[in-house]
Image (cartoon, rainbow, N blue to C red):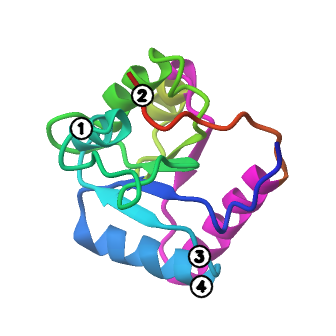
Amino acid sequence: MLTNSKTEPILIVEDLEDDVLLLQMALKRNEVQGQVCIVSNGQEAVDYLRGLPPYDDRNKYPFPYIIYSDLKMPLMNGFELLTWIKSHTDCSVIPFIILTASAQESDVKRAFELGANAYLVKPSTLKELTEMIGKSLGFWEISQKPRPPEKCS
């Protein structure tokens, strides 16, 4: 099923406010019109995906079409979140993109071993981030993928 990635909900899992702001600006510059929801760690992302309070209102917190996640976060890091998502078959269809400052080969390898769909290293400029986000959204827009459920069990 092809969908318009610019109108679908996006979940950002990022603990640094500056990075969240840059991501929001990059999404806006890419004319993303879908709802962008932000959580600050993997545990909040799990609660969001499961539809637990305070994320139980799917009108306010729609199920994501795509997830961008940092790796280094408190409570539950990106690797742990990725492991949780891929172990829940109803959630495993959501494209999971690592967006991190780490370019360490061991992190890249581990992310793909755990089932990441892409691994992007945060660039140093907003222009580069905008281009990177635009390309990643464009890829998922032309890719066939199943519709995700309303929540993960």
Disc 1 residue type (three-letter): Leu
Q: Earlier in the sequence, mark 3 or mark 2?
A: 3
- Whole-angstrom CA distance, mark 3 to mark 4, is 10 Å
Mark in the foreground, 3 or 4: 3
Residue density around tag 3, few if under 14, some if 14–19, many if 20 or more, within 10 Å: some
Task: Give the residues drawn in magenta, as a range.
Answer: 112-141
Disc 3 residue type (three-letter): Gln
Residue visible at 48% across and 67% down in the picture: 35
Residue visible at 34% across and 69% down in the picture: 20
- Whole-angstrom CA distance, mark 2 to mark 1, is 10 Å
Q: Is residue 44 left or right of residue 106?
A: left
Residue visible at 24% across and 38% down in the picture: 52
| Helix, strand or loop at mark 2 | loop
Q: How many marks?
A: 4
Disc 2 residue type (three-letter): Cys
CB of mark 2 within 8 Å of CB of mark 1? no
What residue is disc 2 on? 152
| Helix, strand or loop at mark 1 | loop
What residue is disc 4 on? 29
Residue density around tag 2, few if under 14, some if 14–19, many if 20 or more, within 10 Å: some
Q: Earlier in the sequence, mark 2 or mark 1?
A: 1
- Whole-angstrom CA distance, mark 3 to mark 1, is 25 Å
Residue 67, horizontal then vertical, whole percent: 50, 47
Residue density around tag 1, few if under 14, some if 14–19, many if 20 or more, within 10 Å: few
- Whole-angstrom CA distance, mark 3 to mark 2, is 24 Å
